[in-house]
Amino acid sequence: MGILITDPFYEEKQIAMNALYRVVDPELFVNIVDLGLVYGLDFAQEKSIEVTMTLSTPYCPMGEAITTGVRNVLSVEYPTKEINVRIVWEPKWDHTRISDEGRRQLGI
Amino acid sequence: MAGINIGKAPKNNAVLPFYGTGAVFFLALTLMILFCPAAVSGHYFQPHLLAIVHTAALGWGTMVIFGASYQLLPVICEKELYSAWIALLSYFCLAVGAIFLILSFWLFRTGVIMIGGGSLILIAALLYLLNAWKTAGSCKKYSVQRCFIISSAIWLVVTASVGLVLAVNLRYPFIRGSHLEILKLHAHAGLAGWFLQLIAGVSTKLVPMFLLGKSDKEKLLRWAFLLQNTGLIAFILDGYFNGITGRVFFYEGMVLAGVIAWLVYLTDICRNRVKKKIDFQMKYVGISILALLISFLLIPAIFYGGDHHFAIVYGVFVFLGWISAIILGMTFKTLPFIVWNERYKNINGKVKIPMPKHLYKENVLNWQFLCYIMALPLLALGIFMHIGTIVRLSGIIWVMVAALYTYNVAVVIFHKRRV
């Protein structure tokens, strides 16, 4: 997920993305940003942040751990805001979304 | 729609008892082989061997597979497990039923305990079917994996029902045909119905998940399902009405073709995987498949050989090769995640925490693998060559495999949160 410098919430989103690097997929040992699981961040609401993301496998047993991780790291950066995580299945995740760093870590 | 389809794993008390108890049964199984080597050298229908086989099939194989299934059914069906309470109830029925059955076979006491044990196993199978049906039955979309899960659960009920009939027949003989012929049908309903189809269904979901792989050859899976079931149904019906004849090879060929279709599908996933580095545990999958194929090759030897040792070697490759290898490997691809989820899920991202793979002792797993690849061929060789010393030596190594496995399972289950 890229963030445009013209984005009105550029700075907030950069802080959030840096925090999300700390959430690691327990099976793949790669963070969710490099895996390309994070689709969007919405700071438009004053009191909440909405994270739109997906999982590599629907109903993955680790899904709740990952979304809890997202809430935990963003709560540290934005303690006064409510963190909402929205899981979507479209567009469907595939390996083309993995970053170069993620590919390196996975040995692709 | 926040939170849709997020995996809510079943509570650990619906899963962990199966793993712990399965490990204890595995240890008991290997001790039986060590202290009663004559049991694996005689005819297959004798008390101690029947006890050993039921320890392998029920206490070890079915016990761990039940636990893993209750964890994985939600992944396959994309829906929460229907009932954790039913899962726990099935655990008690299976554990007590297996103990009753194994003890009654070992002492060869036909009657109340054997029939009671068989009844409890049947209740466990029915409870499992109910849970699988209610979870899988409401899948939003059709999948071959779902068909495999349901069919395997139905075959388990069939196997347990026939087993109960055989237990009753031992005390109150009423079957007009041969008890041993029906025993063969009972055994193969369990092997090619319950174990094969469950493993086929779960593996085609798990392997893509672990390797980030995919295949567009789903047609192969549909053929696998069709061939495995048609071959098995034809074998059982023909065997029941006409006895086991040379036509068994035709049915074996059908099931084997179904197995090959499934394996080609798995190979295609491996070829198209993203994660190139294959975990250590996946080596067990290779051994498991090899043992399965060797078992198929042994069937003509059993039919024409006239030597009961072929049947025992066949059983060794099926239970201690194919089924045990897959469990020994996959335990440490599932159990650490189950425990990690409970201990660390809520603090994920807050502090530095261990990953699931850090919950077990990797060096113990390496030793377990080394012992295992020695124990399996040694036991088969000892039985095949009729050399008691080799059987006893392999028994010692089997106990080491089981002890290392049980220790590592205990390390994971009793892991305490470090942060």
Image: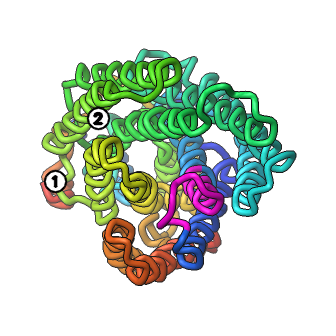
Question: What chain does mark 2 sit on?
Answer: B
Closer to the camera in the image, B137 or A6: B137
The C terminus of chain B: image quadrant: bottom right
Q: Which colour scheme is used?
A: rainbow
Residue A102 rendering spot, x and y as whole percentages: 20, 54
Question: Which residue position is annotated with label 2?
Answer: B259
Q: Which of marks 1 and 2 is in front?
A: 2
Residue beneath label 1, please? A103
- How many numbered marks are there? 2
> In this picture, is B195 found above or below B277?
above
Is residue B207 in the magenta section?
A: no
Return the x and y of residue B42 as percentages of the image width and height. Answer: 50, 63
Range of magenta residues: B39-57
Residue extending farthest to the right is B112
Give the residue type that dot 2 points to.
Val
Observer-nearest of B104 and B55? B104
The three-letter code of the residue at mark 1 reads Arg
Q: Residue at horizontal 50%, vertical 44%?
A: A61
Locate residue B12 relative to residue B211 in the image: left or right. Answer: right
Q: Is mark 1 on a helix, strand or loop?
A: helix
x, y percentage for residue B184? 51, 38
Asked which secondary structure carries label 2, the reply is helix
- Of residues B302 and B254, the one nearer the viewer is B302
